Amino acid sequence: MNQNLPQDLDRESLNQLSKEELVEIIIEQNKVIRELQKIIYELQQEIERLKISRDLDSSNSSKPPSQDIHKKSENKKVPPQEESNQPKKKPGGQPGYQGKTRKSFGRVDRYEILRPENCVYCGQKAFASVAVKVEKHAVAQLVERPIEIVEYQRQTCVCECCGNVQTAAWPEDIIPGQDLGVKLQAFLGWANNYAHMPYEKQQEMLWELGQIEIGLGTLITTK
């Protein structure tokens, strides 16, 4: 912005400015407003995420009891006599402990290129096509919809060579007449038999993962 513009933008000062100077002021203020709106939105999203994360535990979500960190730490108190008899450990790695370095996942399912959008100095988007620095960080993400609804349309067609009428085969990962695919049934079987997740919790989990409503009868018959 022009450094000669008055800092006190009252009505009288604005009336003395040229049209070009007024346009320049409006453009600069719009940039500031957009940046502030973006920051406010990101802060609101972070506040909501922290509120939800703070209130969730094994009693009101599908989180296992082992993740109730705050409640476990509050309820677990060491008796004074035990605390006094045991030597305090020094911070950091303990003698004889073999540390482990962070390993990669061994695969990448999707690449996402992150490029700067608007220059913080001039507001333009004219960034060079070749980056001067690239930082890589592989993260295991829970995708937006881990469960998708697929409608299979099996067709019956006539062979133009011999006139045979033939129907396509169903895929191997579905069971005709059942609403849940083979992989999803196997996952629910694990949740029921090994994780001991109640059917009501399984219903909540399916809604969170794919926004689908599954009746208790379907879950009970799933082995």
Image: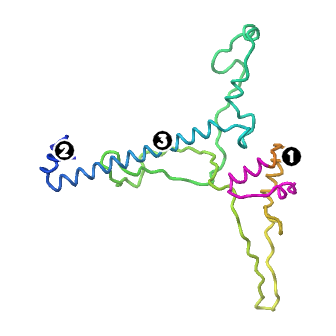
Q: Which residue does the numbered mark 3 point to in the structure image?
A: 43
Tell me where residue 164 sits by quadrant. Answer: bottom right
* CA neighbours of label 2 inside 10 A, class few (<14), some (14 to 19), many (20+): few
Q: Measuring from the top left, give residue 93's x and y in whole percent.
A: 66, 21
Q: For the residues carrying marks 3 and 1, which lies nearer the camera in this image? A: 3
Q: Measuring from the top left, give residue 221's x and y in whole percent.
A: 87, 57
Distance between mark 2 and mark 1 Cα atoms: 72 Å
Q: Measuring from the top left, give residue 151's x and y in whole percent.
A: 72, 70
Q: For the residues carrying marks 2 and 1, which lies nearer the camera in this image? A: 2
Which residues lie in the magenta part? Answer: 200-223
Residue, x 31% and y 51% (percent of image)? 30
Q: Which mark is residue 30?
A: none
Which amino acid lies under the numbered mark 1 shown in the image of this protein? Asn
Q: Is residue 66 left or right of residue 45?
A: right
Could you say which is closer to the camera, residue 4 or residue 16? 16
Q: In this view, does 83 lie to the left or right of 199?
A: left
> Pointers 3 and 1 in contact (CB under 8 A)?
no
Could you say which is closer to the camera, residue 207 or residue 108? 207
The kind of secondary structure element at disc 1 is helix
Q: Which residue does the numbered mark 1 point to in the structure image?
A: 193
Q: Which residue does the numbered mark 2 point to in the structure image?
A: 10
Mark 2 / mark 3, whichever is N-terminal: 2
Mark 2 / mark 1, whichever is N-terminal: 2
* CA neighbours of label 1 inside 10 A, class few (<14), some (14 to 19), many (20+): few
Residue, x 68% and y 14% (percent of image)? 89
The image shows a total of numbered marks equal to: 3
- Viewport quadrant of the C terminus: bottom right
Residue, x 77% and y 50% (percent of image)? 202
* Residue 32 vertical position relative to residue 152 in the rendered view, above or below: above
Distance between mark 2 and mark 3 Cα atoms: 32 Å
